[in-house]
Amino acid sequence: MHFNVLSIINYYVFYLMWELCFLSKVFMLSLALERPWIIYSSYQHFHFLGILVVFTFWFFYCSIWSTMASEEVLKVVFPFLEGVDLASCMAVCKLWKDIAGDDFFWKCLCAKRWPSICKRPNPSTLTYYNLYRTFYKRQHRRILLPPRISFDDLDFFIDIWAENILLFSEVVPGSVLQAGFKIPASGVCEMLKYHLEGSEYKMTFPVEPRFTIPCGQNQNVSVSVMVGKKDSNKFARIINKSMFDYIDRSSYRALAFDYLDIAPDYPFLTGIRAWISLLFMEDKKEDLMDVFGIQMDFCDVANSKEEVLWLLDMLDWK
């Protein structure tokens, strides 16, 4: 016959309870023989005392055994949990926190995600729990500090050429570029309206007066953009003679880009592009582009006003 530890413990517990009941009755009987006149009261007293002792012992036994049993169950279940679930278990109660905080469980989780971490010859004092909590997910983006410049401090110098013909040349205040413009009520395709009304941060301004570009000459249309600080008389280059060599017919845009000149103080910031687009009306004449607005953005890295201002501040100002 097979006996496990639980059955053996239960056997001895019930045997001890039976012995306590028997001894209490024997003790009560011996007193009754010496003093028969108190047999009734003695019987009541010692019978109650025996029952009280038995139930008291049984209560403490159940409490201790239930705690031991729950600990064993938790130690079996916890290794199957993910890190987030195991961390949630630590907030249930003190018992669960003590068990779930065992660094062995967190070492197993670290071994699943970073097996080489557990092969360190000289483990550091950093616990696996702290290691997992720090690196298990990507850190949230930090909130940017307020930019050191504003659009009110800037002027943008935009020049557009077709061969040797100057098509557009304006000094656009930063406040105007930031504010954008109202989309014309008619003549603009739905795809372009959807793009301009999108959540992506972009800087736009209207072209007055409008100008047209023959589609056959779009390869020869170039643009230059400079930005200047009003208070310091310094300038930085954003786009240098870039060609509008891509036309998106679906959204009625002609696009050009150039790589920003970042100050030497930021040697690891390279390959960041500035984009500029000519926005043209939906026209039945497919050989002409009727330009009504210009858009500029830094969508590769900057998607908010603050990010754009920080990026402009990091240009190579001279």
Image (spheres, grey):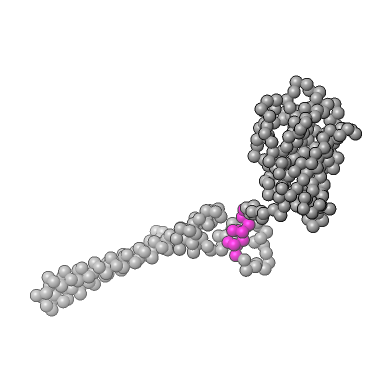
Q: Residue at the bottom extreme?
A: 34
Q: To which quarter of the image does residue 31 belong?
A: bottom left
User: Which of these two is toward me, 21 or 131?
Assistant: 131
Determine if residue 259 is in view.
no
Q: Residue at the right extreme?
A: 164
Q: Position of residue 259 (x, y in %)?
A: 81, 45
Q: To which quarter of the image does residue 13 belong?
A: bottom left
| Quadrant assignment for the N terminus | bottom left
Please say if 313 is above or below 39.
above
Q: Is residue 55 left or right of residue 238?
A: left
Seen at 49% across and 62% down, the residue is: 97
Q: Specify start and end residues of the magenta stretch as a single range.
A: 127-137
Residue 132, magenta (yes or no):
yes
Please say if 263 is above or below 176.
below
Q: Is residue 182 left or right of residue 83?
A: right
Seen at 45% across and 63% down, the residue is: 94
Residue 65, magenta (yes or no):
no
User: Which of these two is toward me, 215 or 294?
Assistant: 294
What is the chief secondary structure element of the magenta stretch? helix
